[in-house]
């Protein structure tokens, strides 16, 4: 381990007061972490020893991005299946609207709904800037997260997020954060092998009390798998590969002697649904005969969901939105058109939220904008794997009927660290079924 | 054809009484049953008595419905409209000795409701066992045992249910009920319909043998007939034993009214000669409300939902009251018409809304007729086709059989259900089905055309066989598990989502629900026409949580 003053990685916000830490990784490579200002370097062996009662517990949240619960099987993903079998499984677990990556990761770390966090979707229409953009800025997230709240209580936290936009929104909230690298072109994510190298290097080097990790391959390959509606060939290979990486992590904890103090929460942010090329919905096309409406509507496309924002004059808003709602809802591929408030999405989500049916996708602002077969964001992609595992004696074995949600991660992890609820309380529930009393 | 036995109750013989005593002992009241035995014995005398047993049903966390029928005077026979109004007292206790009393009260009944009694004690504890009994005119009923549902939102590790349907008195003995009563481990019994049959003796029995003739000895068409028929079934000691041991959750299918009933009539109804359908249906519903332990009264609806903590809900469907008339054939374009309905709009909205409730994990549906599509194999002989048609109530036009009485005959409604399940990714929905006198375990395909390649299933369907009613070997006139086996294989071949099929056996099923998986055991009887039939576990299938697919356990 050594302390570096590195060049600022290209493409990321310039780091003014960040410290950097270069850690040895597998195969002689090294992993570069940024470190919160004021953190003693090198890291103390036990960052929060003074504040935690009883024996130390390490908690790792592993997000297998886009994984469907039925994809975890002993044949295809033996390591994940074994963890699920030995821990507490929540088969009724679901993602929350909008079933996209950024909002659900934010819900995991905040424990509150998007109307309190400000993060309802991946892509929104930003009224202030009059542009459709990803919610990938640290300032987009208006609510404290586990990463900073635990830090404030003297625990050390880490973020190992494979996707560029996730690194973007969680920014510098963790004590230690890995900036994903190498980033693949198009997908904007780091392959799971590199992500796992970083997680293991972080655990070995600075041993945070809590680490939030996103493994992006299963999602990224799912999006682009052209055999998704039938063979799911690439997807299947990615699942097996990611399973290997999870197994590598478990083996590493066992070898390091920390497995007995570790709690793993493994879940997905959403699942995946594949559509054939003819099952595409374009609100742009639906409104093509109504230029008066089309010109006043901004469309933020989120795969299985479209967020529609009225940009025209206020006096025409109600009538215009009513017309848009009727036209969009009449499309055979559209499941529902909702008010964002009914889904607890907040004003950032715009004025209408359209979900597609299973086997469909949105493609906006143009019919060719979304060519990828695998999508999520709509209710068909709500079921997720969600289980608590690990060698810690606090983890119990069983299956729970409780309706676990992504939003339950923060209260569940918070309870393990004795962390108080945030101001206004959690919207999620601590899943105590997973733990011995 | 008239049968000489026209009284409402057959006299109990000595063996029946002994068995009855054993039943009460099972019900947990062994120490105190001495006082209740005279009530049974009274059936053979002329004093007042509770001759049709006791029953409970429709458990909620704080209440359960209790049922009995008082015969206050010898002439107050079921369906007679004769006899005085009487007051019946009831007691509910936490123990079989009625030392820890939980609730008590009294209720008036009389000929207006055929001297039946339904009470719903409230304020009970959730997930708790209770004992109950009735008394009137110095006579005390048998003691029944029941159980409330767990508290809303409570974690429940296990729910075990008996699942039965199609119990035709004339076709044999209700040994299935006896074996369920003897288990002692059931939380509830689900009866999916055809609890009783409308036919006259000789019209429908065990192959050609009327094992026990129906009373009255005519097809039931009037209120008096329906009441008498219900009363006759409630004299069966195996059925009495099960009612006294476990709360029932019931719905009706067609034979509670008449064969292949729909909103405006029935296959087995002749308008005019048998009165109007509206009158006949109202009569059958009134008798059903009077004689069944169900939270249903005439004018209301029987579709309803029960929850067992966060583990499971059960939505009981009514697929007769609101349905459009069956299509005449497979080529009838009406089959797919969105204007036709099996459920009616209000019930459909209620059903779909229930699927989306986050309150419970397993969404069980008490579904009187099959929802999985069934294509008829093209390789069957004419005799086999004819037999299967008779079993499944199929219509044949131009040699293409099609079951227009099931969801197969109402494809627009089925599409609404399957699309809702798929579009909203509803998990752990399981249809529990009766009606067709055979055992099935099926995936419910998202799309039957692509199922063979992708196996995409939106739900599971588990079909229990008949308690007694005829099935394929009976219709073919062959020994069980001989000629039917090839027919079953042909059906499975033509319908890859059908994983298990037994066209021959009679019996019952036991469903065990846990958070990790749901499992159905099919038990088959050695011989329905033998009062002492034995019971054997035939096969077990499970649905692992989150899979919407059946797999074989045993």
Image (spheres, rainbow, N blue to C red):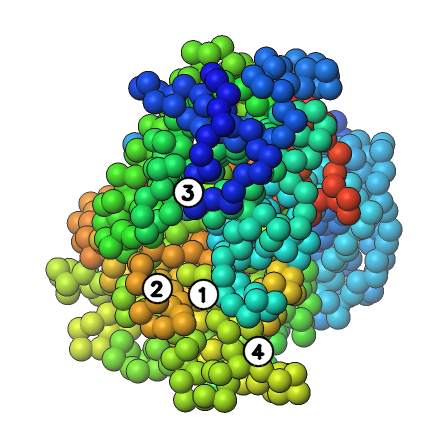
Q: Which mark is residue A178?
A: none
Q: Which numbered disc flags the more N-terminal residue, 2 or 4?
A: 4
- Chain letter for the residue marked with disc 2 in the picture: A
Circle 2: element type: loop
Residue located at (69% from left, 67% from top):
B297
Return the residue at label 1: A301
- Distance of label 3 from label 1 (alpha carbons): 27 Å
Pointer 1 and pointer 2: residues touching (CB < 8 Å)? yes
Q: Earlier in the sequence, mark 1 or mark 2?
A: 1
Residue placed most toward the observer, A219 or B129: A219
Q: Residue A205's x, y, as percent?
A: 49, 18
Q: Say left or right for A44 vs B116.
A: left
Q: Is residue B459 above or below residue A24?
A: below
Sequence-wise, the earlier of marks 2 and 3 is: 3
Seen from the viewer's position, the closer of residues B511 and B171 is B511
Q: Secondary structure at mark 3?
A: loop
Residue A311's disc is 4
Disc 1 or 4, which lies upstream in sequence?
Answer: 1
- The answer for how far apart the CA atoms under marks 1 and 2 are is 9 Å
Q: Do the residues marked 2 and 3 share a common chain?
A: yes
Residue at 40% x, 70% y is A364
Q: Read off the chain for label 3.
A: A
Q: Where is mark 3, residue-wise?
A: A10
Secondary structure beneath disc 4? Answer: loop
- Quadrant (top left/top right/bottom left/bottom right) for the N terminus of chain B: bottom left
Residue bearing mark 2: A370
Q: Which quadrant of the structure image shows residue A400?
A: top right
């Amino acid at each position: 381990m050594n302390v570096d003053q590195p060049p600022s990685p290209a493409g990321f916000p310039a780091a003014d007061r960040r410290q950097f830490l270069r850690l040895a990784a597998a195969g002689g490579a090294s992993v570069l972490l940024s470190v919160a200002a004021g953190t003693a370097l090198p890291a103390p062996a036990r960052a929060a020893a003074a504040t935690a009662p009883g024996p130390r517990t390490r908690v790792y949240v592993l997000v297998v991005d886009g994984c469907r619960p039925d994809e975890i099987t002993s044949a295809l993903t033996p390591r994940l299946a074994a963890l699920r079998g030995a821990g507490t499984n929540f088969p009724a677990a679901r993602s929350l609207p909008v079933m996209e990556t950024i909002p659900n990761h934010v819900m995991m770390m905040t424990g509150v709904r998007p109307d309190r966090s400000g993060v309802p979707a991946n892509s929104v229409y930003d009224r202030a800037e009059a542009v459709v953009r990803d919610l990938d800025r640290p300032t987009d997230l208006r609510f404290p997260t586990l990463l900073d709240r635990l830090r404030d209580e003297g625990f050390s936290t880490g973020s190992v997020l494979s996707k560029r936009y996730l690194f973007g929104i969680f920014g510098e909230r963790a004590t230690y954060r890995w900036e994903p690298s190498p980033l693949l072109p198009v997908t904007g994510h780091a392959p799971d092998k590199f992500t796992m190298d970083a997680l293991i290097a972080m655990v070995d080097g600075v041993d945070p009390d809590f680490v939030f990790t996103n493994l992006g391959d299963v999602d990224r390959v799912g999006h682009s798998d052209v055999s998704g509606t039938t063979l799911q060939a690439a997807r299947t290979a990615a699942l097996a590969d990611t399973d290997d990486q999870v197994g590598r992590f478990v083996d590493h904890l066992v070898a390091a002697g920390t497995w007995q103090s570790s709690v793993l929460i493994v879940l997905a942010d959403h699942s995946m649904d594949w559509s054939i090329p003819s099952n595409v919905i374009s609100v742009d096309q639906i409104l093509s005969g109504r230029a008066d409406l089309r010109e006043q509507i901004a469309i933020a496309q989120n795969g299985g969901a479209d967020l529609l924002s009225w940009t025209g004059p206020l006096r025409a808003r109600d009538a215009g939105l009513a017309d848009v709602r009727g036209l969009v809802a009449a499309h055979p591929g559209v499941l529902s058109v909702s008010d964002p408030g009914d889904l607890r999405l907040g004003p950032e989500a715009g004025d209408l939220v359209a979900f597609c049916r299973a086997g469909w996708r949105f493609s906006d602002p143009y019919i060719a904008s979304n060519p990828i077969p695998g999508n999520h964001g709509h209710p068909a992609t709500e079921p997720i794997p969600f289980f608590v595992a690990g060698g810690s004696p606090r983890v119990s074995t069983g299956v729970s009927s409780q309706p676990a949600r992504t939003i339950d991660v923060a209260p569940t992890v918070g309870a393990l660290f004795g962390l108080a609820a945030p101001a206004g309380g959690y919207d999620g529930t601590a899943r105590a079924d997973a733990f011995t009393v | 054809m008239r049968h000489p036995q026209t009284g409402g109750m057959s006299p109990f013989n000595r063996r029946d009484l002994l068995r009855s005593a054993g039943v009460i002992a099972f019900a947990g009241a062994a120490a105190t049953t001495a006082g209740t035995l005279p009530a049974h014995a009274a059936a053979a005398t002329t004093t007042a008595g509770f001759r049709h047993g006791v029953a409970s049903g429709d458990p909620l966390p704080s209440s359960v419905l209790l049922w009995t029928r008082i015969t206050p005077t010898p002439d107050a026979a079921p369906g007679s409209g004769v006899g005085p109004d009487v007051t019946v007292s009831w007691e509910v206790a936490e123990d079989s000795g009625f030392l820890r009393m939980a609730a008590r009260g009294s209720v008036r009944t009389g000929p207006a409701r055929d001297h039946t009694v339904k009470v719903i004690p409230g304020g009970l504890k959730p997930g708790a066992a209770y004992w109950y009994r009735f008394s009137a005119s110095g006579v005390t009923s048998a003691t029944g045992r029941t159980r409330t549902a767990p508290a809303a939102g409570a974690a429940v590790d296990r729910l075990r249910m008996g699942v039965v349907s199609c119990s035709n008195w004339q076709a044999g003995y209700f040994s299935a009920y006896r074996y369920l009563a003897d288990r002692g481990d059931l939380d509830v019994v689900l009866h999916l319909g055809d609890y009783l049959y409308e036919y006259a003796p000789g019209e429908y029995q065990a192959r050609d043998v009327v094992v026990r003739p129906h009373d009255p000895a005519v097809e039931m068409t009037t209120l008096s007939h329906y009441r008498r028929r219900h009363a006759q079934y409630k004299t069966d000691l195996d059925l009495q034993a099960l009612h006294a041991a476990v709360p029932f959750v019931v719905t009706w299918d067609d034979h509670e009214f008449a064969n292949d009933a729909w909103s405006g009539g029935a296959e087995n109804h002749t308008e005019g000669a048998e009165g109007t359908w509206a009158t006949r249906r109202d009569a059958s519903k009134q008798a059903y409300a009077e004689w069944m332990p169900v939270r249903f009264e005439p004018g209301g609806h029987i579709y309803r939902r029960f929850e067992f903590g966060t583990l499971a809900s059960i939505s009981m469907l009514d697929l007769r009251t609101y349905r459009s008339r069956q299509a005449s054939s497979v080529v009838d374009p009406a089959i797919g018409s969105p204007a036709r309905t099996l459920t009616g709009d209000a019930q459909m909205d209620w059903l779909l809304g229930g699927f989306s409730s986050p309150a419970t994990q397993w969404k069980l549906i008490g579904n009187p007729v099959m929802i999985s599509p069934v294509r008829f194999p093209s390789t069957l002989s004419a005799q086999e086709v004819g037999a299967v048609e008779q079993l499944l109530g199929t219509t044949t036009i131009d040699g293409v059989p099609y079951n227009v009485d099931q969801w197969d005959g109402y494809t627009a409604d089925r599409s609404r259900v399957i699309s809702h399940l798929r579009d909203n990714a509803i998990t752990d929905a399981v249809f529990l089905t009766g009606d067709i006198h055979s055992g099935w375990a099926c995936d419910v395909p998202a799309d039957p055309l692509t199922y063979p390649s992708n196996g995409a299933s939106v739900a599971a369907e588990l079909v229990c066989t008949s308690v007694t009613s005829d099935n394929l070997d009976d219709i073919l006139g062959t020994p069980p598990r001989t000629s039917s086996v090839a027919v079953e294989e042909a059906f499975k071949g033509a319908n890859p989502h059908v994983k298990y099929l037994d066209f021959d056996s009679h019996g019952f099923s036991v469903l065990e629900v846990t958070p990790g998986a749901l499992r159905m055991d099919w038990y088959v009887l050695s011989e329905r026409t033998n009062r002492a039939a034995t019971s054997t576990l035939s096969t077990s299938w499970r649905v692992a949580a989150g899979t919407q697919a059946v797999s074989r356990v045993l």
